[in-house]
Amino acid sequence: MLLPARAGAAEIQRWDLRDGEGEPWGLVVFPQPDPAYAPGWRLRLTARRPAAALDHHEPLQLDDGLGHLWQLANRSSELVAPGESALPPQSAQFDLEALQPRPSAVLPLHLKLALVDGEADLVLGPDQVAALSSLPQARSNQP
């Protein structure tokens, strides 16, 4: 899915990751550009394994290993136009609003992502964690 052109390229951050089983994933952090949805930062995970099917209802769980836990609301419905129901099975999107307080920029973050047939565990490294810890307040997506 391509993001609308009015989302600035400098605001969109992308990384390639591997889960605990070595499977490839894509991670994208971006401000929600579509005025049909609430503004704010989103985190999108995409499985690069064709057979993967992500759960589009469960939150994303984050843990810094020192007792700080976050649950990010699932916003996978934003992956399609309002009113459409067929969601892409390999992608899920989450609202970063609940990532408060922001995590430390120096600790890895463990992500637990619900799949239709289990779960995937991913670890965010220094670059990804620094990006999340320094996200500015959400700006309005209204013109």
Image (spheres, helix red, strand yellow):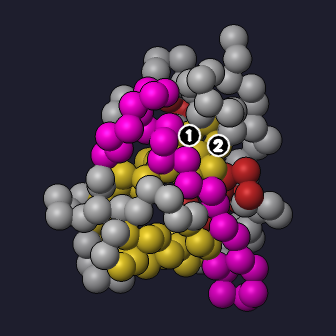
The answer to whether residue 123 is left or right of residue 132 is left
Residue type at the position of mark 2: Trp
Q: Is residue 104 magenta?
A: no
Chief secondary structure of the magenta portion: loop
Residue positioned 52% across, 64% down in the render? 58
Image location (x, y in percent) of residue 70: 70, 70
Q: Is residue 64 magenta?
A: yes
The reply to whether callout 1 and callout 2 are in contact (CB within 8 Å) is yes
Quarter of the view holding residue 64:
bottom right
Q: CA distance from mark 1 to mark 2?
A: 6 Å
Label 1 belongs to which residue? 30
The answer to whether residue 63 is left or right of residue 122 is right
Looking at the rendered image, the quarter that the N terminus falls into is: top left
Residue type at the position of mark 1: Phe
Image location (x, y in percent) of residue 2: 36, 29
Regarding mark 2 in the picture, which secondary structure is present there?
Answer: strand
Q: Earlier in the sequence, mark 1 or mark 2?
A: 1
Q: Which mark is residue 126?
A: none
Residue positioned 46% across, 21% down in the render? 4
Label 2 belongs to which residue? 41
Q: Nearer the viewer, residue 47 or 8?
A: 47
Residue 126 visible in the current orientation? no
The answer to whether residue 91 is left or right of residue 29 is left
Regarding mark 1 in the picture, which secondary structure is present there?
Answer: strand
Q: Which residues are magenta?
A: 63-88
112 above or below 9? Answer: below
Q: Nearer the viewer, residue 10 or 2?
A: 2
Residue positioned 64% across, 79% down in the render? 63
Q: Which class describes the residues within 10 Å of circle 1: few (<14), some (14-19), or many (20+)?
A: many
Image location (x, y in percent) of residue 143: 69, 11
